[in-house]
Image (cartoon, rainbow, N blue to C red):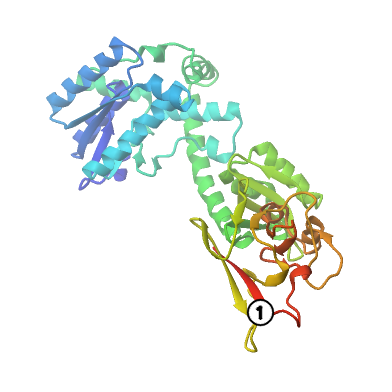
Amino acid sequence: MDKKAVDKEKKYIVALSGGADSVCLLLKMLDEGRHVEAAHCNFHLRGAESDRDESFVVSLCSRLGVPLHRAHFDTREYASLHKVSIEMAARTLRYDYFEKLRRDIGAEAILVAHHRDDNVETVLMNMVRGTGIRGVAGIRPRNGHILRPLLDMSRSDIEAYLRERGETYVTDSTNLEDEATRNKFRLNVIPLLRTINPRASENIHSTSKHLAEAERIVEWAVSMAREEIITSQGDDLIIDVPRLEAFVSPEYLLNDICRDYGFSTSQIADMSEAIREHHVGAVFSSATHIAAVANINNQLCIQISKTIPDQSEYKLPEEGIYNLSSTLKVIIKSEVIADDFVISKSADCATLDYRKVAFPLTLRTIREGDRFTPFGMKGSKLVSDYLTDIKCSVIDKRRQQVVVDATGTIVWLVGRRTSDKCRIDATSTTALVIALKK
């Protein structure tokens, strides 16, 4: 057991199911003089067996003088409501409860009883599913406020310790069935591997520890590279492609970045190909984000943004202040054009000839076929062509807003250009000022 991981001066919670692993963990913590309390979850998934486990835990903690916290869950109902598997529901309920309890009682961390054989099963499962260095590095000894002090002990070590102590434990009957994927590895695959090499489990565990150390080096190198190639542009993430390509493994680095935003391995592979082909405008969507290959300031980049929702149309019937959302306010006012009048040069402000604009106004995102007459031009131009000419990215095009008047004339390409049809000239007497505050 990793004795350094647990501070004698602090309080910890032992996740106590009543099985051999968690009973061993509790007893070893008490042997080491650690300050612990126990927590037990009854998921009501195994009928009388679930209640048997809870009764055992209550009796054990009473005998050992360990404070016990208990929680009961309707796991099947939770899984149905959230449309997740029973296993995922139980995991979410368990760890959410542990974390809340940790905060409530001021505990340093939650101790769980994953051991060496659990780690070997996890490594093999990840390999079969397909994984990278993180997957074959196995279970981490620490993950936030979750500690796993028994990772270097095998299941046989745990059972030997309990026999020596004369301690009993309960057995989850579902662990003896090979229907679940993990149980297939535990009951069938790993015993077969041991016929090839009796030390198969030890060797796999040792390899995962070496890879975990290698992962630390990789993470350090990747974090340094991230700082070099990633910049922020408002809420967007901009990846500098030339700097990305200069990295020792561009594909690995791109995968490390993009998976944080929900992109799949195949999408990232397609993204890499789009970069190689300089396919500006290629778009990739995850559940939460959108990525596009873009040319920003004459530099090939990948722009990652949160998924752009459908923008509502906002009616602006007259002068006034409009609080359109928690992050957007529009101010519309008229102003007499006197000798000291100055046209605003701010990108978030449009100054137009009041007479040439018809209320009500509408603020909306651009549509296919939208045309306007950019300031300084006589003929109209497709808004999409104008945005392409000024090298707007696909993402910026999708979020581009316009102000349209009652005649359907685009009077302002927001943040970029006003319409020449509404320009102030020598005959103008009153200005219409439209300002967006974000």
Image x and y of residue 8, in percent? 21, 45
**Residue denoted by label 1:** 343
Q: Residue at x 67, y 48 (%)?
A: 291
Front residue of 339 and 119: 339
- Amino acid carrying label 1: it is Ile
- Say which residue appears at 53% left-offset and 15% top-offset: 192
Q: Residue furthest bottom?
A: 339
Does residue 3 appear in this view?
A: no
95 with respect to 218 (left or right): left
Q: Quadrant of the C terminus?
A: bottom right
SS at circle 1:
loop
Which residue, as the protein is rendered here, is positioned at the far right? 379
- Tell me if residue 154 comes above or below residue 405 in the rendering: above
- Pick the quarter of the image with the N terminus: top left
Name above or below for residue 87 compared with residue 49: below
364 vs 386, left or right, is left
Residue 406 appears in the figure: yes
Q: Eyeballing the image, is 344 above or below 117? A: below
Question: What percent of the width, then of the height, locates residue 137?
Answer: 51, 38
Horizontal placement of 59 versus 149: left or right?
left
Image quadrant where residue 35 sits? top left
**Residue 107 position by quadrant:** top left
Q: Which residue: 12% across, 30% down? A: 65
